[in-house]
Image (tube, rainbow, N blue to C red):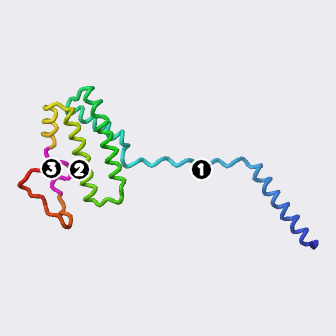
Amino acid sequence: MSRFGKFLAAALLLFGLTALAQESSEPPATPAPTPTPVPRHHPTQTDQAEKRLKRLSKRLSLTDDQQEKLRPILQDEARQMKAVDDDTSLTPQQRHKKTREIRMASRSQMDGILTDEQKKQLQSERPHGAGPHHGRHSAPAPGTTAPDSSTPQ
């Protein structure tokens, strides 16, 4: 190796050690602050179930026993609804159908726990067809026909 090559190697080695020594003498860099979690658009499944249970309890004057029996039904419903919501492969029509099926199954289970008076009250407060989408029916999916308005659904 020539004199120049040895000199260059020694200079590079010295430069590298100097840079390393400077890094170790500096105080450790503080890690970047952890970003604040972005608030979730949807509350957790348990939150949804508890809020719904609280609303039902207030509206229907549920007993403690009824509340405890309804809690797992509402939690399961919220879990299933989240799964439908997270399933990006579903068309809007499929999503609506599954959501309706989940709600109907939950309602059927709830009917076994509620008194006749509570069922009537629940039915009278939200008659079939009422709700946030009432009056905003879209055209039927291709290949289907519009439901006959003369028959109850």
Position in image of residue 58 (x %, y %) = 23, 32
Instruction: Please state which of the two labelled residues, at mark 1 or mark 3, is closer to the viewer.
Output: 3
Q: Is residue 16 left or right of residue 106?
A: right
> What label does residue 32 carry, if any?
1
Position in image of residue 24 (x %, y %) = 76, 50
Is residue 57 part of the magenta span, yes or no? no
Mark 1 vs 3, N-terminal side: 1
Q: Secondary structure at mark 2?
A: helix
Nearer to the camera, 21 or 132: 132
Span highlighted in magenta in the image: 127-136
Nearer to the camera, 119 or 121: 119
Instruction: Please state which of the two labelled residues, at mark 3 or mark 2, is closer to the viewer.
Output: 2
Residue pointed to by mark 2: 100
Q: Give me the residue at 20% from left, 67% from top.
A: 142
Q: Is residue 32 left or right of residue 74?
A: right
Which quadrant holds residue 126?
top left
The amino acid on which the numbered mark 2 sits, given as a three-letter code, is: Arg
Q: Secondary structure at mark 1?
A: loop
Tag 1 near tag 3, CB within 8 Å: no
Q: Give me the residue at 19% from left, 36% from top.
A: 111
Q: Furthest-left residue in view?
A: 150
The amino acid on which the numbered mark 3 sits, given as a three-letter code, is: Gly
> What label does residue 129 carry, if any?
3
Label 1, label 3: how many angstroms apart (C-alpha)?
52 Å
